[in-house]
Image (cartoon, rainbow, N blue to C red):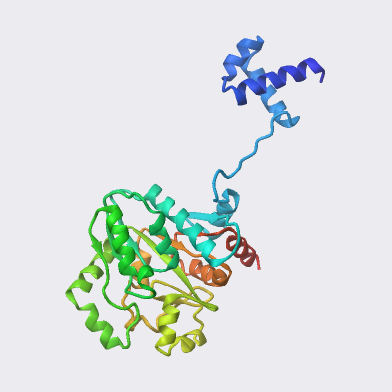
């Protein structure tokens, strides 16, 4: 190929890719057919005159997110790049991206369900606007005041402007009888009646092996955490426990104030948020339960998940 042809190919490539001219317009400029221009543009890529690069404009790793979604059959997956792997940095980054996702996908036809936790508390920090929707607590109170479900539901409800339905009861109580009595309370029963109307649930993933969960702390204070870990519990969502293979363990179902696994599974989209090295196996197990449709996690954990899936 001579220098004149190279110049013509480069000219066609610049006009098409840089200047936005159509093939027909470039053909008229060079007095050739549009089919000739198509071949010239293809040649420009073959010769390296044109190099196409797809980059991530924000903190979400696009390639890793696509691979994560494909590998685990998720509806959506967002692998968030973070400056380091300290828990505070990861929680803040995931909270911001999860908030951006909600602002993007929530419509006025939705009913939102929320659990509690440090990362979901940070979602409310970055959440600025939502359609007018109702917000329903998917579980009772656990953890520090600013991170528990009542406070999170209150904040999200204020942003959305719809009705807010918190649960004024502990996530884990002392006995099945106490749980049954609380569920019959009119205010709590009203929230329970809203579970079937939730269309998008936003939940945190807690790890039990190693411990990184408000529910684990509550179970430990109740003196039952060690026995549950011995049963194989590696993590939880809401108050739903599961083992490493994603099998649901129902040992505390009769004494928890929260949505059940069957009710959670019936929600059209469950968005799970969780990151950090300590939660690696809990997140993998949560995916295996089949309860999760969308995952927001950090890029380092996403990479570990993909490697574990190959083993």
Say which residue appears at 42% left-offset and 78% top-offset: 215
Say which residue appears at 60% left-offset and 49% top-offset: 63
Where in the figure is residue 170, as x and y percent of width and height?
A: 31, 78
Say which residue appears at 28% left-offset and 50% top-offset: 109
Q: Residue 301: name its quadrant.
A: bottom right
Name the outermost residue toward the right.
Answer: 2
Q: Residue 10: name its quadrant.
A: top right
Where in the figure is residue 29, as x and y percent of width and height?
A: 63, 11
Check the picture and name the quadrant holding the N terminus: top right
Asked if residue 209 lies left or right of residue 153, the reply is: right
Where in the figure is residue 277, as x and y percent of width and height?
A: 58, 69
- Depth check: 191 or 47 in front? 191
Say which residue appears at 34% left-offset and 49% top-offset: 129
Where in the figure is residue 272, as x and y percent of width and height?
A: 45, 63
The vertical placement of 165 against 220, above or below, is above
- Depth check: 19 or 176 in front? 19
Asked if residue 202 lies left or right of residue 182, the reply is: right
Q: Residue 193: name its quadrant.
A: bottom left
């Amino acid at each position: 190929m001579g220098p004149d042809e190279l110049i013509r190919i480069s000219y066609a490539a610049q006009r098409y890719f840089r200047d936005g001219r159509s093939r027909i317009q470039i053909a008229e400029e060079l007095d050739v057919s549009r089919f000739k221009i198509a071949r010239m543009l293809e040649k420009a890529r073959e010769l390296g005159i044109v190099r196409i690069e797809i980059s991530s404009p924000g903190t979400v790793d696009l390639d890793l997110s696509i691979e994560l979604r494909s590998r685990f059959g998720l509806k959506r997956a967002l692998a968030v790049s973070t400056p380091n792997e300290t828990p505070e940095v990861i929680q803040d980054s995931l909270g911001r991206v999860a908030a951006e996702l909600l602002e993007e996908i929530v419509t006025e036809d939705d009913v939102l369900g929320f659990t509690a936790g440090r990362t979901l508390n940070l979602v409310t920090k970055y959440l600025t606007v939502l359609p007018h929707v109702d917000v329903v607590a998917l579980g009772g109170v656990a953890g520090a005041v600013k991170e528990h479900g009542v406070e999170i539901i209150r904040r999200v409800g204020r942003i959305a402007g719809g009705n807010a339905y918190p649960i004024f009861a502990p996530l884990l109580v002392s006995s099945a009888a106490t749980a049954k009595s609380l569920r019959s309370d009119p205010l709590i029963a009203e929230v329970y009646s809203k579970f079937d109307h939730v269309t998008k649930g936003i939940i945190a993933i807690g790890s039990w092996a190693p411990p990184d969960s408000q529910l684990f702390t509550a179970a430990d204070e109740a003196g039952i955490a060690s026995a549950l870990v011995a049963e194989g519990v590696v993590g939880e969502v809401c108050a739903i426990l599961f083992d490493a293979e994603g099998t649901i363990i129902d040992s505390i179902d009769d004494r928890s104030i929260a949505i059940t696994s069957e009710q959670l599974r019936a929600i059209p989209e469950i968005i799970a948020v969780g990151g950090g090295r300590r939660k690696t196996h809990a997140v993998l197990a949560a995916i295996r339960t089949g309860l999760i449709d969308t995952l927001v996690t950090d890029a380092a954990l996403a990479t570990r998940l993909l490697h574990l899936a190959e083993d």
